[in-house]
Image (cartoon, rainbow, N blue to C red):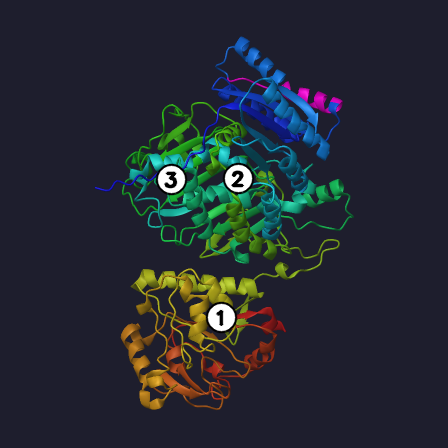
Amino acid sequence: MCVVFLGCPQAQELQGHVSVILLGATGDLAKKYLWQGLFQLFLDEAGKGHSFSFHGAALTAPKQGQELMAKALESLSCPRDMAPSRCAELQAQFLRLSRYRQLKTAEDYQALGRDIEAQVQQEGLREAGRMFYFSVPPFAYADIARNINSSCRPGPGAWLRVVLEKPFGHDHLSAQQLATELGSFFQEEEMYRVDHYLGKQAVAQILPFRDQNRRALDSLWNRHHVERVEIIMKETVDAEGRTSFYEEYGVIRDTLQNHLTEILTLVAMELPANVSCSEAVLRHKLQAFRALRRLQRGSAVVGQYQTYSEQVRRELRKPAGSPSLTPTFAGVLVHVDNLRWEGVPFILMSGKALDERVGYVRVLFKNQAFCAQSEKHWAPAQSRCLPRQIIFYIGHGELGHPAVLVSRNLFRPFLPAQSWREVEDRPGLQLFGRPLSDFYAFSPVKERDAYSILLSHIFHARKESFVPTEHLLASWVFWTPLLESLAREVPRLYPGGADSGRLLDFEFSGSHLSFSLGQPEQLVPGPGSTPRPSDFQVLGAKYRESPLISAWPDELISKLASDIEAAAVQAVRRVGTFHLALSGGSSPIALFQQLASGHYGFPWRCVPLSDPESNFQGLQAHLLQHVRVPYYNIHPMPVNLHQRLCAEEDRGAQAYASEISALVTNCSFDLVLLGMGTDGHTASLFPQSPTGLDGEQLVVLTESPSRPHQRMSLSLPLINRAKKVAVLVMGRTKRDITLLVSRVGREPKKWPISGVLPTSGQLVWYMDYEAFLG
């Protein structure tokens, strides 16, 4: 018998003296949270074989700095269940252990290092480690890191832990530069990047909850049962007093790129066998990051409360008539491309000056039940018609405290009784449209601040609660392209609070997100406003008496991809299959990339499949290799039989026609995607060539005026049997042919594209503004 033990490497717990150095000790974060968190750490760990010294540090001169720090320490509080006399005794001990020092020059850091060593030696202590907390702006990190590395490292056998606060960069490049700089001074295991949302009790409970309820969740936590996931952070306050920060970062960098994305990975990641193993948790989180589908411009909507630009002008002394484009509200649609979550929308939303302050993660399950009796007879624990959901309630809102809620018609969850207790019903309280009594609801036995939890995790080297370099860079790789595409986007203005009404409501179709209500029209531009491309979205009109969709390229591709996806969903629901014929050329490449989330392709054109000019090669490179489509659902044209290209005697056209007849009912494709050449050709049907323009043949061999001359194409009669034909026309070079074709009748021998008119289906033109307007 061979027995294998799968262990998890644990950080060694060294007992001894710990020096904590809080840089930025007189700042707002220190005063509000960090000193209280360090006091809680002292209460938790003193007397367990550890001794402490706390050094508050800043650039401020010693006398003034000591006064500011003393003021910050006045507000320290003890747990409610601690006797006042014991509290006063411990507060006095903490104050005796805390001292202020100015850290400004290299000599100051050298002196700090000497003082710590002297204290350890004089008191006969064994040094366990040193913790440096950077509560300072990131531009100061490099100099501080250099000084710590050269003068303040502990001796052999003791640990060094460096705690870093966001923002960690502005985009992928700046984050990489900062990470490289810090990496030259500290090892990865020495760095703890704080995202304080990972310390919030409801968020910290996501993985333990999934682990403790594996049996109930294993069959539910996937695309077959989850309808969508909402990760929400709403604030009622605006950015007043913080506009200098907000102008540089905006809502996406401030909350979505970090807090909400970290939460998303906790929900979406595969559950490791041991959720207490930091290494395993971080490895599975990284896999979740890497499975995130690339965001497109159409993946987001952005807004800005109406008084923001005026606040910016006032606080930053900017001239009148210079509106800000910084979003204060954002909704983003995210997809996770793996087998568990394929097709499940993850909705991330955050904003300022909204109608309520609340944060939550809501997992909404599919519900296909119908109940014959009226709702008043539905029993919450039994009725399958009531909403089924699991909610990690981060705080505030109607409930007012952290909680975990599970619909009674799902299952009764397990949460450890020593740390979570069941909440009593509160008649009249409604959460997500349902009374609290519809849920099994649990709240923490003792509410704790996020920073006190994270400081404890730093002390015990629990790295899973922090952001490693690889995760940070993976997050920025994901978010940077969207941020760049939104840089010139004009955000939707909203009045703020309840007055915003439905103005910020949004909806999604496929991978595209859009506001539910149209933007109120501004007939007369305001002072200094200049129209931008993003001011003009999707224009609906007619072209050759058929519907025309016209937009800028990104919006056009998003719209066409959404329409194809909607047609696919409808066809599959109706008959179980969706038959799509895709053309070649350069125009569809962006579409293929957009569609790289799971569609079926049936390309045509007569070039060897391995040839760089092959349309199938383009389809393979930009779409098929990224999706899980069975090979037997992909039907490239047989253009290269017997090592010859489109030879008539090989009967490739007839073979392909037979394949279509066998697979496609009535030879009617659900959707055919075409392009239009500058000479009016479409598919591989060319002017002055009668082949394939009429008759009974479904697939034909044609001659092209350009190389390669031998082509294979679907015939015009077959194309016109389709339920829908989409013609994609893009680029300034198509302007002349677009204008010409708009004026001619049905003359396919001169302009084959003019012969495209489905017999009983729909023709829709998709043109970008350059092709349509020049």
Earlier residue among tags 3 and 2: 2
Determine which residue is flagged by label 3: 389
Instruction: From the image, give the main secondary structure of the stretch colored magenta.
Output: helix
Q: Residue at x 78, y 48 (%)?
A: 319
Spatial separation of the CA atoms under disc 1 and disc 2: 37 Å
Q: How crowded is mark 2: few (under 14 residues within 10 Å), some or many (20 or more)?
A: many
Above/below status of 243 relative to 445? below
Residue 583's x, y, as percent? 44, 75
Q: Which residue is drawn at 67% across and 57% down?
A: 523
Please give left or right for residue 700 compared with residue 536 in the image. left
Q: Label 1 is placed on what type of residue?
A: Pro
Looking at the rendered structure, the secondary structure element under dot 3 is strand
Q: Is residue 374 visible?
A: no
Q: Label 2 is placed on what type of residue?
A: Met
Residue 618's x, y, as percent? 46, 72
Residue 265's x, y, as percent? 45, 44
Q: Which mark is residue 233?
A: 2
Determine which residue is flagged by label 1: 588
Please give left or right for residue 725 compared with residue 523 in the image. left
Please give left or right for residue 182 compared with residue 708 in the image. right
- Image quadrant in which the C terminus is located: bottom right
* Disc number lying in front (1 or 3): 1
327 is within the stretch colored magenta: no
Give the quadrant of residue 732: bottom right
